Image (cartoon, rainbow, N blue to C red):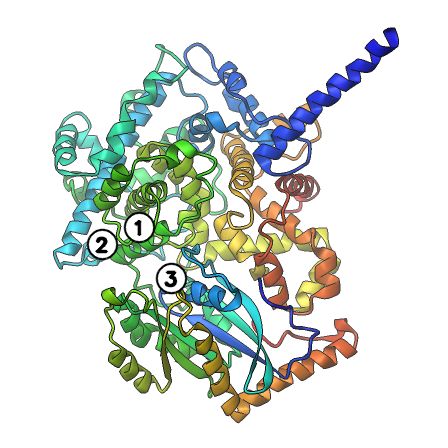
Amino acid sequence: MTAMQTNSTPAVVFTALAGVAIVAVIFYGASRKRKHALSPQQWKVFFTEDGRLRDGGIRLLKRVRSGGVGPRIRAEVWPFLLGVYNFNSTKDERDAVRTQNRKEYEKLRRQCRKLIKKSNESTSANEFLSSQDRSPEAESSDYPSIVSLEGDDYVNVSNADASLLDTDFIESPEVIQTVPSDDDQEDNNPMKTNKDSAEGLEVIQTAPPEDVQEDNNPMKTTKDSAEGPEVIQTAPPDDVQEDDSPVKTAKEPLQEKVPSKPPTNEDFSTWQRIIRLDALRANADWMSHYPSQAAVSDSVARRTAEAVGLEDYGHLEAGRIFHAARLVAILEAYALYDPEIGYCQGMSDLLSPIVSIISEDHEAFWCFVGFMKKARQNFRLDEVGIRRQLELVAKIIKYKDAHLFKHLEKLQAEDCFFVYRMVVVLFRRELTFEQTICLWEVMWADQAAVRAGIGISAWNKVRKRAPPTEDLLLYAIAASVLQRRKLIIEKYSSMDEIIRECNSMSGQLDVLKLLDDAHNLVITLHDKI
Amino acid sequence: MSSSSGQTSGHDLSFKILLIGDSGVGKSCLLVTFISSSSVEDLSPTIGVDFKIKTLTVGGKRLKLTIWDTAGQERFRTLTSSYYRGAQGIILVYDVTRRETFTNLSEVWSKELELYSTNQECVKMLVGNKVDRDSERAVSREEGLALAKELGCLLLECSAKTRENVEKCFEELALKIMEAPSLLEEGSTAIKRNVLKQKQEPQARQNSGCCS
């Protein structure tokens, strides 16, 4: 009897573990054991009564860094991870940010529609943009140079904007897109609060979210930092009155020179065209994970598509049409918001998972803006950002594995151009939907920790773990190459072969192993790099 | 994806081919259709470059074609330009239903090609894709022929969707390449180099002979 009882305990434990493993397999498509993703219950517990995250989000970030976020609460958690909401904000403050963000997004959409109308009326949209000082070479900070909106809204905040909005809503069929889901989630939000909003509405309303955080987060921008905060101040005064003018860059040209390459001919209408092409061929693997979004009715999908001027979608099913239309709306708005980057292929890969998970366009937009704060460097016209990233990957490989690096040098592949795609679309092409999201969440949590100044010390206290880094992605990329070191050294004798190996990694990677390896690299190398 | 790694099996000739043209004209679709037997739709946009290898027999010769697929957006051009180097054949692709993709070939792409292609005799080919959508056609065959004449190259209209003329594109191109003595020479030295390399120790090689 007793013997049987003692025996049964391990069996129970074993079964429980097996359950965990199965969950891990389902969520991450990998067979390794791993901590649970953040669950809705845990998530709720993190908040105080006024809807503020306890301990400035440290525990949240720890959880996400080790296990990602459970599928059901992603839409709530991501805005924090992506810097849309401040970790120290109360529910009320977030509501205010959210309202303001929605207005700004809607304004961008109105501008998009006007530009489209204009370009349809033969005046090309380019004139519109190029007549303004768009200076692609200028940028080197992590901040979009967009500024006019703040000034704009400053004036409109309490009056004109709302009415303008309403009229626009009536004439625009695009309402469909926003309206049905638009009945404010605020009500559903589990975090009820009525205290505090010390920041003052004005601050919140007039600054884009990244700047709101500025106060509390010593935002460490990657390399060239420093520029960020000025962005607001440099808003040209004339932007204030011009409601309809598309976004201007207000930054002065600075340091980084564009290499001999002539300025591009790309303009807003080019972007519009490519955005539409890419939206229609977005990867559809999200559909099986979020069937409710995929199950949109045919008529809603078509109306939404028409509203953004999507064509040639007849062969697609409703869910994909709807998804494509939302991608178009948000990417177009982003191109206006950040005209130095505009639209570059690959950005739709980054936005698509966000759109799949966040049902409100304006929320998805601002999450995307948060995502792009770091990722936008990769899409810069002068390619400075992407080169820097590749150099860093090379450095990691060099420090970790001199032998492999020598081999790469021999093949003239030491510039690591073979990981170009992984850098640009952050493993989206190599990993499945769930795997990608897991990787991104862990990476976002790292970046958020760095942003919030939760540095090495806070982490070391707990246990010997990898400190958060801005560049977890690059460590993961280096790890994926290092995992193939033997193959590369022994079998490959040209860079072509390495490119092919890297471009055919999809389906071959175990995201958990990748993250483990990346974290190990961070532990051993972060001091040197 | 590709039919073979091509290194070990016997080929007579090895050629590098490059696909260029605007975004969304179907470069990747053409390539994937050619490589695999299934037809494809809605491929994600190409980021940077990619390539596939196909072995086939043309004119009695066993060929290994390394076909490079490039991103269409202008922004990627600095990157993709380095892949022109050493190409024996370049396929300029346009979409017969979108006129601007056709005009960009003469205004943009043919100039890129002149600028970056290192092979004087490099064979060019004009390919109008998506002829299955005939009702939406915006570029006539005659216009295509006229541009082909102007650029001094072949024209083929095809459809990656129906596979019409897809294989022919690559075969015709390969035949043309083999007609040029200097390119033929390059194609066979590439093979010899490989054979030599395999006989010697693999470490001894200096460069890949392809791209940087």
Q: Residue furthest bottom?
A: B181
**Quarter where residue B211 is shown:** bottom right
Visible residue check, residue B88: yes
- Given this view, does label 1 or label 3 mark the residue nearer the observer? 3
Instruction: Determine the secondary structure under disc 2.
Output: helix
Above or below A413: residue A325? above
Q: Position of residue A302 (x, y in %)?
A: 25, 43
Mark 2 and mark 1: span between their CA atoms? Answer: 9 Å
**Quarter where residue A293 is shown:** top left
Q: Which residue is mark 2?
A: A129
- A432 or A117, which lies in front? A432
Horizontal arrangement in the rendering, residue A315 relative to residue A388 (left or right): left
Q: Amino acid at mark 2?
A: Leu
Q: Residue at x 50, y 44 (%)?
A: A222
Q: Which residue is mark 1?
A: A339
Q: Amino acid at mark 1?
A: Pro
Q: Position of residue A241 (x, y in %)?
A: 14, 39
Q: Which residue is mark 3?
A: B73
Q: Output the chain of dot 1.
A: A
Q: Amino acid at mark 3?
A: Gln
